[in-house]
Amino acid sequence: MRKNILTKLPVLVGTGLALLVLSSMVSNNHGQVTKNNLLAAADTEQNRFTKTVLSEKLDEPLQMVILKDQKVLFIERKGNIKLYNPATKATTIAAVIPVSTKYKDKDGKISEAEDGLLGIVLDPNFYTNHWIYLYYSEAGEEAKNILTRYEFVDDKFVISSKKVLLEVPVQREQCCHTGGKMVFDDLKNLYLTTGDNTSSRATPYSPADDRDGRQPWDAQRTSGNTNDLRGKILRIHPEADGTYTVPEGNLFPKGTEKTKPEIYVMGIRNPYTLFLDKRTGYLYWGEVGPDASKDEEGKGPKSFDEYNRTKTPGFFGWPYFQADNKPYNQFNFATNTSGPLFEPEHPVNNSRNNTGLTNLPPTQKSFIWYPYDLSPEFPLLGTGGRSAMVGPVYYADDYPAAKRFPSYYNGKLFIFEWLRDWIITVSMDKDGNYQSMEKFLPGLKFSHPMDVQFGPDGDMYILEYGQGWFTQNNDAQLVHITYNGGNRKPTVMAKADRPAGALPLKVKLSADGTTDSDNDNLTYKWTITNKTGKKLATLTGKEALYTFKLKGNYKATLTVTDAQGGVSSKVVNIKAGNEPPVITIAVNGNQQFYFPNKPFTYSVKMRDREDGVIPGGTVAASKLKVNIGYKGVEVEEETLGHKAPPSAETFAAGKAIMLKSDCKACHDDSRKIIGPSWKEIAAKYKEDDETVEQLAMKIINGGTGVWGEMHMSAHPQLPKDDAKAIVKYILNINNIPASPENLTAKGTYTPASTNGMVNITATYTDKGVPGVAPAYVERAYTLLSPVVQASSGTIMGDYPVTKKKGNKSAVYVRNAG
């Protein structure tokens, strides 16, 4: 029986607000939480899903195809094509494609860009003809992206089989926007996305600069141009001889003057993901948008990312419209003057760089759209940096295997966010209209998901790009999400009350905390073995007693079996013959709270039966490791860096806030990624109140121009105090000394910050005895700030709804039953 009751429990917390929600959030009516949907979401029971890493430390993985034998082919931007083999659990290189990844401007400056190996798709008859299509930036002096076909035989690409079907001329002076994703329909027509190949660095609004020499800054010459293949979704029919024909039904009939017949969809910016729902006919794509953090009169609306879809050819607005057809102004970059707004029903392209039609088709609005800040239409999408990506629509009967995903997800569209690191499912009614959305596995951590697909087995596969740009990331990986629709194995907890001690060592073993998600009856078996694996005893019961009479290292293995045969186990290590050390920590004065800038004394003592004592014994005092650290929760402006010399603790809160944000996607301590390193920023600016205020507002509002033309994303959701804490951490990064290796066993410490906790930690590793490993002990003593903010609670949902009465706020707590 499921207990899952949503209860309201108002708790008065002054001016703060905390929201504790112990399950996935489900939304309706464009993201609003409903009780019924919360109950329905529990049917998916997230502990039935398992995330397994198949291949890691990848080098910019972009897209994959999953074969019938569950091998996974995936591409990396710099040209590698890799093959994961589930039988051997090994990843090998199937091919290396020479690609161009650099841009070179008119001044000769070379920069890394988005170009490279961009897309991969299997031919509809792959298992008979072995054809695979690749889209990539061809290496060489000629600037072009090419659609190619190769044979794939015996897990290798036959390089000599290369056929070039289509060439897309591009410019390689200024970054970015490539597209490059492909799908086939049931008629074996190939859809290919292409980006607008236009720089966004000069303006966060519409890049429509048609002045001489400014072609890379004018998306009217590409996305808005009916006679150019860029900024489009192309639809062609590949032929057996390596050429292609154009099917009927594209945007412009064959032979139409000043048009390209391959164009199916035009007016798109950076369509980085693509999916075709063959049941409904909807073609979905995620479109990464521009960078304006706010509306600006005379230029146009703030920026949005979009999830788009269509069943028919059409014009989707860029660079004249965004979102639900929000128009830009017609802007003259030569005179810096603004004209009227573009009209969605009658868009015109008057750019001097336009080689196509002047009058364009009426623009189509987006399916789902969202800005940097909270979307009133789709609030579940959250706030922060944006990179919209689209995944598949799931249909349970496509996958007959019993372990397929539950029918709860039937007909739902999976969308995901590269920067915000979430996956969301979108529900539609029988007519395809938007109905609701909900988070998918919000308890799992994703590291910039780049591609999400279902394999032939019905399992989900995800490529994670990792946090850094244009680099090989440790967290770049291929992962496998499996669903267990049957019996779930027990979740085992095992512990010993005395995992180490002198002889004779009497130990109480306990399985307390062991659970079974199916509420099955459980049986418990303990197996005692020595270091050679020899079995010494077998015990039964949730608790068991055993006395070790000989010194040595032992294992107590708990095996738990449920009523349906599911088995799980856990090992407890026992060290008999060596009594572990005992550490005590004491402070003078208040035993629970610290006070900013008020020193306190501490004293640490260690006693070990075999080694002796510290202080006052024969053991070197340096073997007792003592450290004091500050863990910040929220930092008030005046407490950071003004009342004490810089220390790691002083700026810990700013560092913690920064690490939780998307800052590390573009910045590093000492290495330039997209933006400058923190150390470069610290060297450029002097810390004073005016600078801190200025840089904090730039974090919140976004900006460009100081470190080149690359635009910094806005973070309107970030409180100003948090932004200031980040700035102060960055500006002091070159001055913060490393935490001391070791403090004395007795001393004085002056905390510098409010709102947080001071942790005193002490560790000691004893000498051990012959035949028994040394024992390691760690003790901690925590002092809290006398000011406790509601924000120090964990917010486990997306809707901290404030209910205020005077200076009081209500907290809503989810009772999980």
Image (cartoon, rainbow, N blue to C red):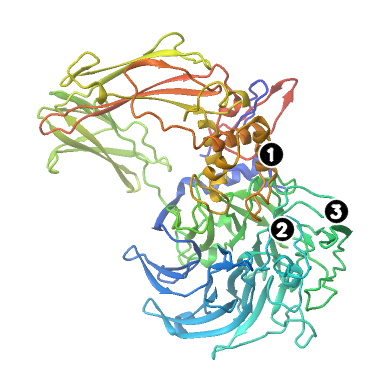
Find numbered disc 3 in the image and state the secondary structure of the residue it sits on. loop
Name the N-terminal-most of marks 3 and 2.
2
Q: Is residue 4 visible?
A: no
Front in this rendered view, residue 209 or 400? 209
- Residue carrying label 3: 298
Front in this rendered view, residue 115 or 172? 172
Corner quadrant of residue 407:
bottom right
Counting from the top left corner in percent of width and height, residue 801 is at 69, 33
Which amino acid type is marked by label 1? Met
Find numbered disc 2 in the image and state the secondary structure of the residue it sits on. loop
Which amino acid type is marked by label 3? Gly
Name the N-terminal-most of marks 2 and 1.
2
Front in this rendered view, residue 27 or 223? 223
In this view, the residue farthest toward the front is 107
In this view, the residue farthest toward the top is 589
Counting from the top left corner in percent of width and height, residue 204 is at 72, 55
Find numbered disc 1 in the image and state the secondary structure of the residue it sits on. helix
Q: Is residue 345 visible?
A: yes
Residue at 73% x, 56% y: name it: 203
Around disc 1, counting alpha carbons within 10 Å, would you say few (fewer than 14), some (14 to 19), or many (20 or more)? some
- In the image, is 781 to the left or to the right of 290? left
In this view, the residue farthest toward the bottom is 241
Label number found at residue 202: 2
- In the image, is 699 to the left or to the right of 252? left
